[in-house]
Image (cartoon, coloured by chain):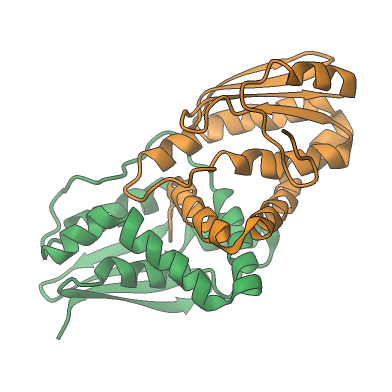
Amino acid sequence: MASQESPMRYEEDGNVHLDFHGAANTTIDFIVERFGVEAMDEIFRKVGRDVYVSIRNDLIAGDTRQLVRHWRHFFDRESGDYDIEVGDDQIVLTVRRCPAWHHVKGLVGHVSPHFCDQTSRTNEAMAEGSPYAIDTEITGEGSCRQVIRRRA
Amino acid sequence: MIPSDHFTRFYNEVFKFLESQGEEALEAYWLAISKNQERHILELIETQGLAGMYEYWSHIKIEENCDMDLDFNEDRLELRMNVCPSLSKVMDNDAAPMERYCDHCAGWIGPIMDKTGYHMVYDVIDRKKPQCVTRIFKDPAKARAAEKDAKLLMGWPGHKVG
């Protein structure tokens, strides 16, 4: 599991518009209320499989570098409090303060109970068919631990 | 976390799902997003009118990295989007764009204009190009006159065109 720089399919720069997380929260509430959690999960899985196809293809090829770089790039852009530990057997992203969760909390006061499903389901979908599993453990409000490890 | 930079690509997947559920589902969603957006723009419009809209979109222009010209006078506000970052990202995407992606913009802005007594003329021009022109008037007669110049006029829930 290397951690060297790797090209990213989507490498945005410029200003950051965190209010999009508020619209994501509204969207999650809307879809879950009208169509159920399974419909929302399937949309997240499509994001993981179809939007992040480049990261997924790398994982299928046994290369975790783009995903690790993606994590660093976007948590840095949104000033998240996190660290990434790259080990021989696993890679662990520890998010102590998720910028998305906390922005929504500050903006509207209510964070959907399904808000963090965006992370869990897209992670699972990106890893589908690859030698890796990506497990997401919610460790508190706006904090989590995401672990990439080889499937047994 | 789906990064805020990637929200539009997530939005695109949501639109595709909702379109598969029917027009009513899509319109109900735009109204939900419109309600969400009220917290950012409604007070500005109610207290400052067109000047409040100008303030809101001046902020958006910077924060969302828009190549956009804003032209404000006492009769109307014009937003001329030269390069829309939202559609640009959806087109620069490994997932297929939703054909009617641009419709969401009128879908959330239009109901707020109806609610506050303003009249929007939203010319998408071409759904496959990341550019559009939106004009907002206080005078409905001026809005109707401006509609005649539009190449692809967009409607919204409660305001059908064509």
Along the horizontal axis of the image, is B120 left or right of B89? right
Tell me, yes or no, if residue A15 can be seen here.
no
Locate residue B102, reporting x and y percent. Answer: 56, 38
Q: Is residue B68 above or below residue B117?
A: above
| Quarter in which the N terminus of chain A is drawn | bottom left
In this view, the residue farthest toward the bottom is A152
Q: Which chain is orange?
A: B
Along the line of sight, the residue nearer the viewer: A72 or A131: A131
Q: Position of residue A120 (x, y in %)?
A: 40, 72
Where on the picture, by quarter, is residue B107? Answer: top right
Please report the residue visible at 48 percent of the width from the left and 37 percent of the height from the top. Answer: B87
Residue closest to the eye, B162 or B98 = B162
- Looking at the rendered image, the quarter that the C terminus of chain A falls into is bottom left
Residue A102 seen from this side: yes
* Residue beneath the point at 82% across and 21% down: B144
Q: Give the x, y percent position of residue B17.
A: 52, 61
Quick check: B128 above or below A104? above
Pinpoint residue A23: horizontal percent, then vertical percent.
Answer: 60, 54
What residue lies at 17% left-to-right and 81% top-to-bottom? A151
- Give the number of callouts: 0
Chain A painted colour: green
Q: Quadrant of residue A10?
A: top left
Using the image as rendered, state which of residue A117 and residue A68 is in the foreground. Answer: A117
* Relative to B141, residue B14 above or below: below
Q: Residue at x 54, y 63 (%)?
A: A101
